[in-house]
Amino acid sequence: MQLQQLRYFAALAEVRHFTRAAEALHVAQPSLSQQIRALERELGAELFQRARGNITLTDAGEALLPLARQILADTETARREVQEVAQLRRGRVRLGAPPSLCASLVPDVLRAYHARYPGIELVVDEGGSRDLVRTLAAGGLDLALVITPLALGAPALATTVLLREDLVVVTAPGGPPPTRRRALRVADLEGLPMVMFRRGYDLREITVAACRAAGFEPSFTVEGGEMDAVLGFVRAGLGLAVVPGMVASRSGLRVTPFEGTRMRRTIALAHRKDVAPTRAARELRAVLLEHLGVGEEGETEEE
């Protein structure tokens, strides 16, 4: 049974006249008659009683008509919905991002994307980079902004480097500066009270590793917070924190850069190697690259 045959059947049942039905369908009358006969042969029953100048539905035709109309309606609904998704009028993109980027880069990118594709639902999962890598690998995200290089044992992801960002020290504006110089060294952090992110944040791992490379263990006054909490603790004078430059510039806190060998982090956009991103996700990637002024290919790494 073909959809075309059901369309011919429904049209003929509507007008009860072969010539008018053929005209409405823009087909030749012999083609219409041939398709109706083929449908009747396949179903094993006559659908119309044919008399000169009078066409009526048989009992089999009466039984088929509501089903045919429902099938045709469902087919049209499916066609429209697929076209809406394909043309980015509907759909969904699930993006994972660390809190530092949710507070800086992501809002501007999502605003530009929503203005371009208002029918696409945007779902944001905020979390540490390592947590996001696991969620992405499990299929819970389409794309994720992550910190590279990925940890050893991370799942197979394709990553495109977006930017390399300096890390800086933030302190309470009313408190003493961490150094009298314009910039400080990692070694200057020894003995200073620090506010530290919870485990799972790459910022925590980067900071602790840098301190240990400088020969000391960092001293935490408060640890375990998310980005907003860490900035709030710093604002309250509980200690300093090492944060990305984009976050620091919007925080209202005193910002002190590092000197010499800078502390930096590399931000990449990741997706699973074994699953091609949807068109909506690919367009989000394009908007992100455009916003950052990165070439369409970016700097791709296979993790």
Image (cartoon, rainbow, N blue to C red):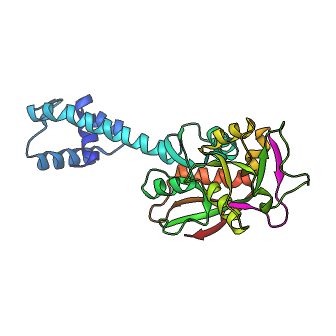
What are the residue bounds of the magenta stretch? 253-267
Could you say where residue 74 lies in the image, as x and y percent from the top left?
Answer: 31, 38
Image point (61%, 66%), residue name: 149
Tell whether position 256 is magenta: yes
Quadrant showing the C terminus = bottom right
Instruction: Decide if residue 51 is in sight here.
Output: no
* Residue 274 figure quarter: bottom left
Could you say where residue 44 lies in the image, as x and y percent from the top left?
Answer: 8, 46
The reply, left or right, for residue 296 in relation to residue 79 is: right
Image point (68%, 53%), residue name: 219
Could you say where residue 109 lies in the image, as x and y percent from the top left?
Answer: 67, 45
Image point (27%, 48%), residue name: 31
Say above or below: 77 vs 170. Answer: above
Could you say where residue 34 lies in the image, as x and y percent from the top left?
Answer: 21, 49
The reply, left or right, for residue 224 in relation to residue 112 is: left
* Residue 171 figure quarter: top right
* Residue 72 figure quarter: top left
